Amino acid sequence: MEIAWIGTGIMGAPMARRLIGGPHHLRVFNRTPEKARALAADGAIVTADAAACVAGAEIVFIMVPDTPDVEATVAKIEPALKSGQLVVDMSTVSPAAERAIAMRLKAAGASAHATARSRLWSAEMRPRSTGRTRCSICSGKGSRTWARRARAR
């Protein structure tokens, strides 16, 4: 599966790192390039800009700090999105802004979904005795639909 991850800061990097390997190909972008390059050693492909990151990805994850950051990110990726791409925003964003962003992405042909994180730090903080860690993503309305789509890919 081709996955794009935008936002590889203190919260995004541990989650993105868990997607590297196996059947997944992960492309990453961060406005501070050094933060994205830290994932290259683990096998992520670092892109020069957000639009290049999402090009051809089946699922796009966004994890940036605030509402204006999500709006700016969406403005940059919108021209590169193709019909059927799933965009999952895990940023801390106002609900009204998230609805407006979802409508905008839907008009571009993509599916949008907002989530909240749970046990986020487990991806980096728990011992890796089993070689696996877990990060739960909580979701509201429409969660079964987008989760089913993500699993089917």
Image (tube, rainbow, N blue to C red):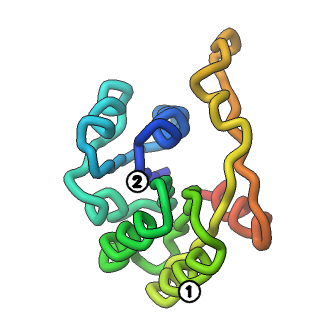
Front residue of this view, candidates 2 and 38: 38
Front residue of this view, candidates 80 and 10: 10
Question: Is residue 23 among what the camera can see?
Answer: no
| Image x and y of residue 53, in percent | 32, 57
Who's the residue at 27% across and 45% down the image?
A: 32
| Image x and y of residue 29, in percent | 32, 50
Q: Amino acid at mark 2?
A: Ile
> Where does the C terminus fall, quadrant-wise?
bottom right
Q: Amino acid at mark 1?
A: Met
How many marks are shown on the rendered structure? Answer: 2
- Check disc 2: other Cα within 10 Å, few if <14, some if 14-19, many if 20+: many
Whether residue 31 is situated above or below residue 111 in the rendered picture: above
Q: Is residue 85 left or right of residue 145?
A: left
Task: State the mark number for residue 6.
Answer: 2
Task: State the mark number for residue 103.
Answer: 1
Front residue of this view, candidates 140 and 47: 140
Q: Is residue 123 left or right of residue 23?
A: right
Task: State the mark number for residue 133.
Answer: none
Q: Is residue 91 left or right of residue 120?
A: left
Residue placed furthest toward the top: 129
- Check disc 1: other Cα within 10 Å, few if <14, some if 14-19, many if 20+: some
Q: Give the distance between the C-alpha atoms of the residues marked 1 and 2, in whole angstroms.
A: 20 Å
| Image x and y of residue 20, in percent | 47, 35
Residue placed furthest toward the bottom: 107
| Image x and y of residue 79, in percent | 31, 79
